Amino acid sequence: MSDGVGNERRKLTDPHELRVLAHPTRLRILQALYELGSATATEMADHVDESPANCSWHLRQLGRHGFAEETGEGHGRQRPWRPAGRSLEWGGSDEAGPVAAASDALSAVFMEQKFDQIRAWQAWRRTDPAPWQDAGGFAESTLWVTAAELAEINAALREVVLRHRERRDDPSKRPPGSRRVSVFTSAVPTDPAR
């Protein structure tokens, strides 16, 4: 499981850090920081529909655990924060006990937020121009593959997304008419191994 794609990854193995990030507001704030590049608590409040004081507190919690950092500019709630840089990874087969439980809790919050985003798009998508309505979407397929082939499918999906990664980090590389788009893929077994 990963919160994004990228070459540099931080593998989360501390149950406390996983639980810190599993807070829905903190996870939304961190995802917004990845999207925006940097933001103050006040700017973040508008973006995630929380109070500036609440955002400030959550940003400090993210900072305490190395998920976010101050940019060194501004004062008080007008201090910009940015993500600490690396994409996060969790949910490996080597997890057990408290680490696995905390990792699964973070995955559940992450997936619920992504499903909420898809449901929201479904609710307003007909208000978009036809080309955007037709370009967006989701698909479902059932395949019979080996574990190695499933890993290959997931790697190929990540590679497609990575082709456009620099646009997220550098607004000057965004072509005219581009919009922020969420890409959430899921290629998982449909039932437990027997």
Image (cartoon, helix red, strand yellow):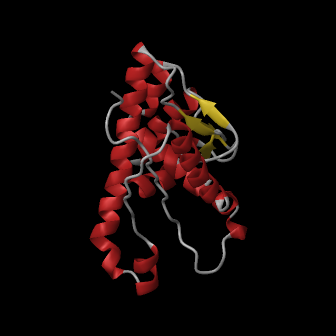
Q: Position of residue 34 (x, y in %)?
A: 57, 50
Quadrant where the image shows the C terminus = top left
The foreground one among 121 and 158 is 158
> Vertical placement of 20 versus 71: above or below?
above
Please indicate whether residue 3 sits to the left or right of residue 109 in the image.
Answer: right
| Quadrant of residue 105 within the rendered picture | top left
The image quadrant of residue 173 is bottom right
**Is 175 on the left or on the right of 194, as rendered?**
right
| Residue at image point 33% right, 32% down | 192
- Residue 57 position in % (x across, y down): 45, 35
Of residues 174 and 164, which is closer to you in this image? 164
**25 lies above or below 182:** above
**Residue 87: x %, y % from top left:** 61, 41
Q: How many marks?
A: 0
Residue name at image x 50 percent, y 55 percent: 43
Residue lying at the far left of the rendered structure: 123
> In the image, residue 170 lies at what x, y percent?
70, 61
Residue 193 versus residue 62: which sits nearer the camera?
Answer: 193
Residue located 48% across and 30% down the image: 91
Q: Is residue 111 visible?
A: yes
Q: Is residue 50 visible?
A: no
